[in-house]
Image (spheres, grey):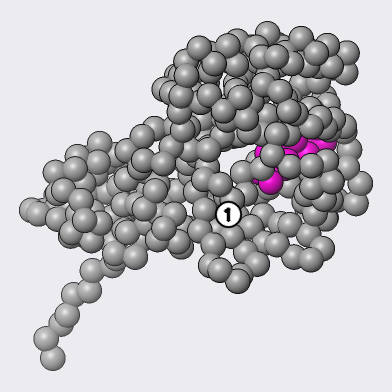
């Protein structure tokens, strides 16, 4: 399921609790088994196989409800493809052989594990529990998506627990959320933090609408949440600032973002000609480059004497 789930690899989506990561995982299952895109910007493989959802967090009725709501939001009346569901109680290592038999007998191509902390028996900070988990998943010879809680510290990379969560993941995305209490919509962004076999993708931003009859993803071209923006890559934050403030100096950008001027200047120069355009004058003024490779710099006005 491009660009989030890489085939035949162990993929991870990390987020805080209540960030709609399980809904995203269910949406990926639907796209995988049906080949239809229910999230704008996502594409599924042409060859469909069944998926298996291993659930430590909720119940079969909850997952069935989410499936119906997501399908309704995408305007799909009947789901194509098969998603098998199994409520889990024991760690993956203990159930690995049983799961292997299920996967092979039913030709399952994608296994979703929700969530990683329960799947290792709560021992997320112990290498001798986490590494066997990845070994067990690898023995199935299929694509795996593990849903995890992200680290509490803003300075830490990847999932909560031992560093092997980050080291063993082949592809890691983090889901960032902002929701106003009392509103039936959630703003989310997917930030690509690790890719072993390809370049990192641009952040994906959505407004997730919850209605009595459906759940629907709406693509957002720009991040409008300051909370989400603060957790995205520095280059994304600079782009967002320059959209509203073209022709800004590195110092002006740094002051607005409360970052060091050298840090901002290095990021601008590193991406000059790719993301940003800098003038030749001193101090240099920077603007975002649009999809045509042109500067989005504000026009210059020349005043004539009366």
Name the residue that disc number 1 marks. Answer: 206
In the rendered image, residue 63, in percent from the top left (x then y), is placed at 79, 44
Identify the residue at horizontal 75%, vertical 29% (top origin): 88
Q: In the displayed structure, would residue 263 be above or below residue 251?
A: above
Q: How many C-alpha atoms fall within 10 Å of the one at disc 1: few (<14), some, or many (≥20)?
A: many
* Chief secondary structure of the magenta portion: helix
Quadrant where the C terminus sits is bottom left
Does 45 sit left or right of 126 as displayed?
A: right
Quarter the N terminus occupies: top right
- The reply, left or right, for residue 174 in relation to residue 27 is left
Residue at the image point whose x is 11% and y is 86% from the top: 305
* Image coords of residue 222 (percent x, y): 47, 58
Residue with the most extreme left position: 282
**In this orientation, which residue lies closer to the viewer: 4 or 239?**
4
The residues colored magenta run 23-35
Residue under the image location 68 percent in, 19 percent down: 92
The quarter holding residue 152 reads top left
Question: Would residue 95 be counted in the magenta stretch?
Answer: no
Q: Residue furthest bottom?
A: 306
Decide: is 89 above or below 14.
above
Instruction: Pick whichever, 153 or 33, lies toward us.
Output: 153
Q: Would you say 188 lies left or right of 60 here? A: left
Q: Is residue 244 shown above or below 169?
A: below
The answer, for residue 216, to whether it is visible in the render is: yes
Q: Is residue 200 visible?
A: no
Residue 81 position in % (x across, y down): 87, 33
* Location of residue 62 in the rendering, given as x and y in whole percent from the top left corner: 79, 47
Q: Is residue 30 magenta?
A: yes
């Amino acid at each position: 399921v491009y660009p989030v789930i890489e085939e035949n690899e162990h993929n991870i989506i990390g987020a805080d609790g209540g960030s709609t990561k399980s809904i995203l995982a269910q949406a990926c299952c639907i796209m995988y088994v049906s080949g239809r895109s229910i999230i704008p910007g996502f594409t599924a493989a042409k060859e469909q196989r069944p998926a298996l959802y291993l659930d430590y967090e909720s119940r079969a009725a909850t997952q069935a409800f989410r499936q119906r709501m997501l399908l309704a939001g995408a305007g799909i009346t009947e789901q194509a493809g098969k998603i098998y569901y199994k409520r889990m109680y024991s760690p993956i290592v203990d159930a690995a052989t049983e799961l292997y038999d299920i996967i092979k007998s039913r030709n399952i191509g994608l296994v979703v594990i929700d969530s990683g902390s329960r799947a290792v028996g709560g021992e997320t900070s112990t290498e001798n529990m986490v590494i066997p988990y990845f070994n067990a998943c690898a023995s199935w010879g299929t694509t795996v998506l593990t849903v995890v809680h992200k680290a509490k510290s803003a300075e830490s990379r990847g999932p909560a627990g031992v560093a092997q969560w980050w080291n063993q993941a082949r592809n890691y995305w983090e889901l960032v959320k902002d929701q106003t209490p009392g509103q039936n919509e959630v703003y989310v962004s997917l930030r690509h933090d690790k890719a072993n076999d390809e370049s990192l993708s641009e952040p994906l931003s959505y407004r997730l609408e919850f209605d009595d009859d459906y759940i629907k993803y709406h693509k957002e071209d720009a991040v409008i949440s300051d909370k989400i923006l603060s957790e995205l890559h520095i280059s994304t934050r600079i782009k967002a600032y320059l959209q509203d403030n073209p022709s800004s100096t590195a110092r002006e950008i740094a002051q607005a973002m409360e970052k060091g001027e050298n840090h901002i200047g290095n990021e601008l120069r590193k991406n000059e000609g790719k993301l940003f355009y800098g003038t030749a004058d001193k101090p240099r003024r920077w603007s975002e480059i649009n999809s045509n490779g042109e500067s989005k710099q504000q026009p210059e006005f020349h005043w004539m004497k009366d």
